[in-house]
Amino acid sequence: MDRSANRPPDRRPELMDRPADRPMDRSAESDRTADSERLRRRARFLRELNEAKELRERVHPRRSRAARRRQQALRMRSFRW
């Protein structure tokens, strides 16, 4: 049987990483380190996301153009009264 199902909701490991669940006695240095690590991971994610979008456009240019047209049309519709 899975023991994680028997844990109270506030003790689940996936929830322990949230800032609200972190202990309050952490030092400012460890907060800065955690923030800089989070920013590094975010920057890497955004770089890879942009790279994936560029690759998708190169591989399927017609599909990409159609998607851009649909997105632009959606934006235009959302601002009409």
Image (spheres, grey):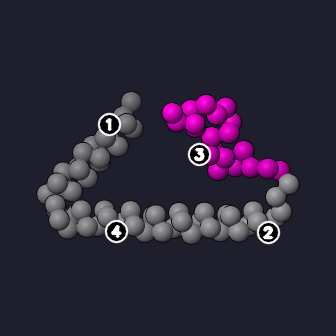
Residue at the disc numbered 3: 14
Q: Quadrant of residue 80?
A: top left
- Residue at mark 4 to residue at mark 3: CA–CA distance: 28 Å
Question: What residue is shown at x 46% (from left), y 64% (from top)?
Answer: 45
Q: Secondary structure at mark 4?
A: helix
Contact flag, marks 4 and 3 (Cβ < 8 Å) = no
Label 1 amino acid? Arg
Contact flag, marks 1 and 3 (Cβ < 8 Å) = no
Label 3 amino acid? Glu
How busy is the neighbourhood of tag 2: few (under 14 within 10 Å), some, or many (20 plus)? few
Residue bounds of the magenta highlight: 1-24
Q: Which mark is residue 29?
A: 2
- Give the image location of residue 16, x and y in percent: 66, 46
Q: Which mark is residue 51?
A: 4
Q: Mark 4 or mark 3, which has the lower sequence index?
A: 3
Q: Secondary structure at mark 1?
A: helix
64 is higher (above) or lower (below) than 44: above
Question: What residue is shown at x 79% (from left), y 50% (from top)?
Answer: 23
Q: Mark 1 or mark 2, which has the lower sequence index?
A: 2
3 is higher (above) or lower (below) than 65: above
- Residue at mark 1 to residue at mark 2: CA–CA distance: 48 Å
Q: Mark 1 or mark 3, which has the lower sequence index?
A: 3
Q: Mark 2 or mark 4, which has the lower sequence index?
A: 2
Which quadrant holds the C terminus? top left
Residue at the disc numbered 1: 77
- Give the image location of residue 65, x and y in percent: 19, 56
Contact flag, marks 2 and 4 (Cβ < 8 Å) = no
